[in-house]
Image (tube, rainbow, N blue to C red):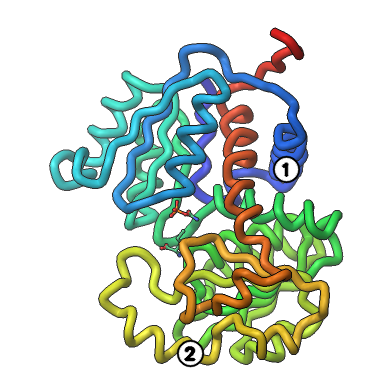
Amino acid sequence: MITRDVISITDLTPETINVLLSDALEIKAGRRRSIPSGKVLALLFEKPSLRTRVSFETAMMSLGGQSLYLSPAEVGLGKREPIADVARVLSRYVDIIATRTFCHTTARELAQESSIPVINALSDVEHPCQVLADMLTIIENKGELSSLKIVYVGDGNNVANSLMLASAMLGVDFTIAAPDGYQIKDDIFDRANSYAQQSGARIIRMEEPLDAVSGADVIYTDTWASMGQEVKSRERCQIFSAYQVNSNLLCHAPENVIVMHCLPAHRGEEITDDIIEGPHSVVFDQAENRLHATKALLLYILGGLDISIGS
Ligand code: CP
Ligand code: NVA
């Protein structure tokens, strides 16, 4: 089997991402597909999850495969056993790994030491599976991706990193408004800009959220304290207080802007209840699209077969 790891969204080419997005749209519209029989996915998670775990498990089930969930308490990646040994053992039992790790380097090492594909199901640096679903949701709501402007408001975290990179790859303008010290780091920004030179996207980092959302087609936010940063939650709530997605912020954006959040959301912190429940919000379609995008990704990696109607 060819090893097709997806640790960063940039492990896929822009062309492949576009194919995955159109496959995901067809799958959502009812095209029935399967993977070769007998395939098993191991979900190796160091952190909790609702959407990622359930969308992967459900996707494998409906594509004709099976999955095994290995919880944070079970394997002890790098603690009970070296990462390389876990990778080599799992490679002899299963066909593919999706891993959620605290450190991005853990996911990279797993991929290096495995002879089977490894998918990053969220690390401290990236969340590539999330941005596939996000781009799918944007296409559904706005049509073509080209000539759009995505504005991310808040912490320059894993989700923001993958969203900036994917936007740059696909030719979508991307602005992040984040407080000083919480911006997307230079290495990701520089990588995004090198893709943007090819795609024509404009990639901007700034501080002022009200200016940032001017002309936005999409406003996106995420928690101010990611998993692993909970002890800093109170301090971060103060630092990010001007970055809440609320009705005042939306007054500075166009009337047809959509509001996105990868969930879980902290209502009253990064987003207000009226906005997440309001007419601009597409967050539950976005959550549903995790399933369709994950199916497209698994079919791409494991090999897809069409199921004829009635079979
Ligand atoms: N958006 C997302 O990845 O959700 P979970 O943490 O619940 O998987
Ligand atoms: N940035 C968040 C995303 C959760 C899906 C975290 O890492 O906790």
**Figure check: 297 above or below 50:** above
Residue at 29 percent of width and 36 percent of height:
70
Task: Provide residue 98's location: percent of width, then percent of height.
Answer: 43, 38
Q: Which mark is residue 21?
A: 1
Q: CA distance from mark 2 to mark 1?
A: 35 Å
Along the polypeptide, which appears first: circle 2 or circle 1? 1
Is there CB contact under 8 Å for labels 2 and 1? Answer: no
Q: Nearer the viewer, residue 161 or 294?
A: 294
SS for callout 1: helix
Q: Residue at x 55, y 48 (%)?
A: 129
Left or right, 250 with respect to 129, comes to right
Q: Residue at x 32, y 19 (%)?
A: 92
Q: Position of residue 208 (x, y in %)?
A: 63, 91
Relative image position of residue 311 (x, y in whole percent)? 69, 8
Instruction: Locate residue 200 relative to residue 294 in the image: left or right.
Output: right
Q: Amino acid at mark 1?
A: Leu
Would the CB of label 1 be found within 8 Å of ligand 1? Answer: no
- Secondary element under disc 2, as helix, strand or loop, is helix
User: Residue 81, located in which quarter of the rendered image?
Assistant: top left
Residue behind mark 2: 241
| Left or right: 291 in relation to 72 | right
Left or right: residue 244 versus residue 111 is: right
Point 66% across, 90% down: residue: 248
Picture quadrant where residue 149 is located:
bottom right
Q: Residues within 10 Å of mark 2 (few under 14, many from 20)?
A: some
Image location (x, y in percent) of residue 303: 61, 21
Mark 1 burial class by Cα count in 10 Å: few <14, some 14-19, many 20+:
many
Q: Nearer the viewer, residue 86 or 246?
A: 246
